[in-house]
Amino acid sequence: MRFLTQFIPVFALTATIASADNWPSWRGPNHSGSTVSGKYPADLTNPANLAWKLALTGKGCSTPIVWENRIFITGPKKGQDTVTSISWDGKILWEKSIGKERRGKHRNGSGSNPSCITDGESIFAYFKSGNLAALSLDGKLLWKENLMSYGHDSLFWDFGTSPVLTRKHVAMALMRNGNSWLVAFEKGTGKVAWKMERNFKTPVEGDHSYATPIVSEQNGHEAILVWGAERFTAHDAANGNILWSCAGFNPTSKNNWVVVSSFVIVDDKAVIPYGRGARLAGIELDGEGDVTRTHRKWTVEGKGTFVPSPAAHGGKVYLVRDRGEVLCVNPKDGAIVWKDAFPKNRASYYSSPTIADNKIYSAREDGMLFVAGIKNGFKLLTENDMGERIIASPVSVNNSLLIRGEKHLYSFRQK
């Protein structure tokens, strides 16, 4: 009964924010990277399955979001951080410049790595420049702030953490050396509701994180779950106070164990990749204070993911590792249900996998997009050369598969 009491509010909260026909944040309506409805094509080279293709104005790596068949995406235009709204038939509805762009420095990065998020009333967007903005659904700028005032961005690579929404606030996690913050802003005004320092002593680069938090319910509190600086922490969404914390992710104090991949939640556990793709942990979600010894339920050595975030579907967790190995993991005990692999290549996987229609969609950095059936184990279905680099994650919503490449946004629909 404790389990049911604790986790029913999680789904109730999610239901108020998004329906199955929306993709309101970078990992979808349930933060899982999956959808349970719709039919989606496997053959993306068949012209009959291409609904439209839209040229983009500049290089951005953020994943599109969707609300009521309107697509929202970030990227640069004429040196400005820009939010663009696109219709369901591939036409630009509006573009809004937020401020001067701070360009990316990695070949697979950009100044527009974070994805937008929406509550159905406003769009919230963040950029590497520090620009945080709220816009109406028709493109009116409601407010903007620049978060460089919270300290120097000392990340070795391009900022990737997306904003998250609580009932009252939009929150940003800034996780870097010496000036890490969790900050909540009032949705309507941009006024700071609260801010909480989140600084922990770690080996070199261990306090850098590109992961995106998840909002959940913990022990009767709306909470923001944050992964970074070798700590998994739950913060009270009302004031930022730490409800509980789990540590012990770098017992031998290795340098450069930066957090890139985000985590995923299945039932009562968070499944967390760490150790530069070499480990996976299952953390029980509740408790009070330091839960390191009591709530870390399992660890898998030698299997994890460094850059791509896991997806959850049907009570299982799916990982596409950086070199294309695919794992299906039981989140209850960390057991590997099956493992297989996409075709090997010198290129790596930066995009996170998406699951829809009993298929897993996964893009490699060189522009190859693979589709495999996962209903009964793993079966490679198609290899699709998109002709341009792909870093953003696929979006499957309302029978449309959205693929953001370096130069174009594609929409595929099964004929």
Image: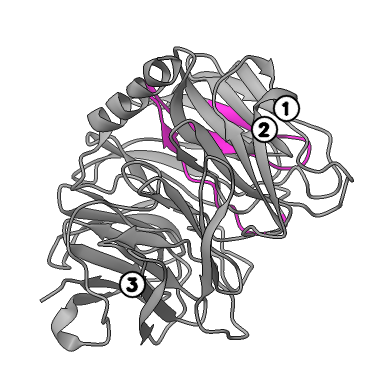
What's under tag 1, amino acid-wise?
A: Thr
User: What residue sits 36% from the left and 46% below the top?
Assistant: 25
User: What residue sits 79% from the left and 50% below the top?
Assistant: 205
Residue bearing mark 2:
296
Picture quadrant of residue 123: top left
Q: Secondary structure at mark 3?
A: loop
Residue 96 vs residue 306, the one in the foreground: 306
What's under tag 3, amino acid-wise?
A: Leu
Residue bearing mark 1:
292
Residue 124 appears in the rendering = yes
Residue bearing mark 3:
56
Q: Secondary structure at mark 1?
A: helix
User: What residue sits 64% from the left and 59% below the top?
Assistant: 306
Circle 1 residues within 10 Å: few <14, some 14–19, many ≥20: some
Q: Position of residue 339 (x, y in %)?
A: 54, 67
Residue 80 vs residue 254, the one in the foreground: 254
Check whether the beta carbons of the residues at disc 2 and disc 1 lie within 8 A of each other. Answer: yes
Tell me which segment is drawn in magenta.
Answer: 156-183
**Callout in the foreground (1, 3):** 1
